[in-house]
Amino acid sequence: MTSSVSLSMPTIPRRRRSPEEVAAAAPVLGTKKVLLAAPRGYCAGVDRAVIAVEKALEHYGPPVYVRKQIVHNVHVVSSLEEKGAIFVDETDEVPEGALVIFSAHGVSPAVVESAEERGLRTIDATCPLVTKVHKEAVRFAKDDFDILLIGHDGHEEVEGTAGEAPEHIQIINGPHEVDKVTVRDPEKVIWLSQTTLSVDETMETVRLLKERFPTLQDPPSDDICYATTNRQVAIKKISPQADLVIVVGSANSSNSVRLVEVALEYGAKASYRVDFANEVDEAWFEGVATVGVTSGASVPEVLVQDVLRLLAEYGYGTVEEVVTAEEDLLFSLPKELRATLKQAGDVSRALGGRRPRS
């Protein structure tokens, strides 16, 4: 059985113009340098999910099935496929009795029930911060609130959260949809959000919602993931100084796409997203003195280092790391896996958290 999850693979290397040719097209005024955002890359939830697949392959042996991409990164998914992971769109593609891992983005109760009906063994690698939002949805639906879920319709995380209480939840894609919202009782309304959204756009949506529903309640704690917030704060600091910002991340990574938007909004003259260094167009360097570099929360550091090596070839060898926060959050591995590791005496990795990854 082959993967049914569509992936974009690296493009074939092409002949690049030399640094001299690029400089001749548009000379650079000023000293060339890179501003490297920190934090960047892997968050605790992503690290935990990837380790879960690696450990499952190690202890149960391949194949291990994964519903959807474990995290939204082409390189990570293809690397796990090489080790024996099989990515599927739905649980009905998994042979009865086989092992399936739920991705970091979470699943609805209906998906869990489907897996149970097929007798599948499951490991739930949902990020604990996403699980928190699920629990909030269940709690407020039980209290008969209308729940306004700010997020991107069709995103796996939003589908999973909305599936917890579909009769109570409306999905709001952004400020432009606020006028369409209807509720049963304006006194019993709360908003929740997808964890990987633009902080600024989310709060603008909330502001407009509160104009319509003044008693709209806030979630008990911030739903937008700490890693999403931290990466946006870092690129906000860099962008006003940057002629160009390169964001490493995949097209289906919501937080990576948001970083490009935030960079442009906060003053970067240009910003582009790439999966791999060979997707960087040297024409972007014409007339550019300062390049900002960051990566989404599901991106291994090796991909960032590849971009930095390419930049060095074009004269951007001076790298200044711009640190706006320190991250030390760790999450325990999924409970289903912890029991297996304990029985096997495997104490090599019990936690997922910030670490460099290839």
Image (cartoon, rainbow, N blue to C red):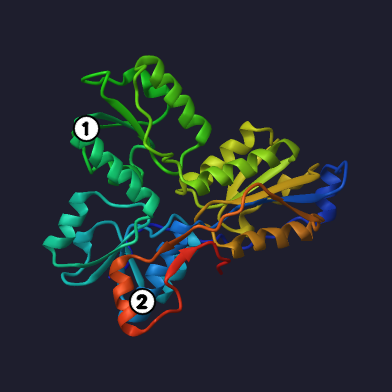
The image's mark for residue 136 is none
Secondary-structure class at tag 2:
helix
Please report the residue visible at 43 percent of the width from the left and 39 percent of the height from the top: 222
- Residue 217, given in percent of the width and then of the height, sits at 35, 27
CA gap between label 1 and label 2 equals: 38 Å
Q: Which of 55 and 92 is in front in this view?
A: 55
Q: Which residue is tagged 1? A: 168
In the image, 299: left or right of 88? right
Please identify the quarter of the rendering in which residue 352 is found: bottom left
The image's mark for residue 57 is 2
Please report the residue visible at 63 percent of the width from the left and 63 percent of the height from the top: 13
Q: Nearer the viewer, residue 214 or 71?
A: 214
- Residue 68, given in percent of the width and then of the height, sits at 33, 57
In the image, 91: left or right of 208? left
Q: Can residue 328 be seen in this snapshot?
A: yes
**Mark 1 or 2 closer to N-term?**
2
Please identify the quarter of the rendering in which residue 191 is found: top left
- Under mark 2, the amino acid is Leu
Q: In this picture, is 149 found above or below 135?
A: above
Mark 1 residue crowding within 10 angstroms, few (<14) / some (14–19) / many (20+): many
- Residue 269, given in percent of the width and then of the height, sits at 70, 35
- Under mark 1, the amino acid is His
Query: Looking at the rendering, in which quadrant would you find the C terminus?
Result: bottom right
Please report the residue visible at 46 percent of the width from the left and 31 percent of the height from the top: 202
In the image, 156: left or right of 16? left
Secondary-structure class at tag 1:
loop
Query: Looking at the rendering, in which quadrant would you find the N terminus?
Result: bottom left
1 and 2 marks in contact (CB < 8 Å): no
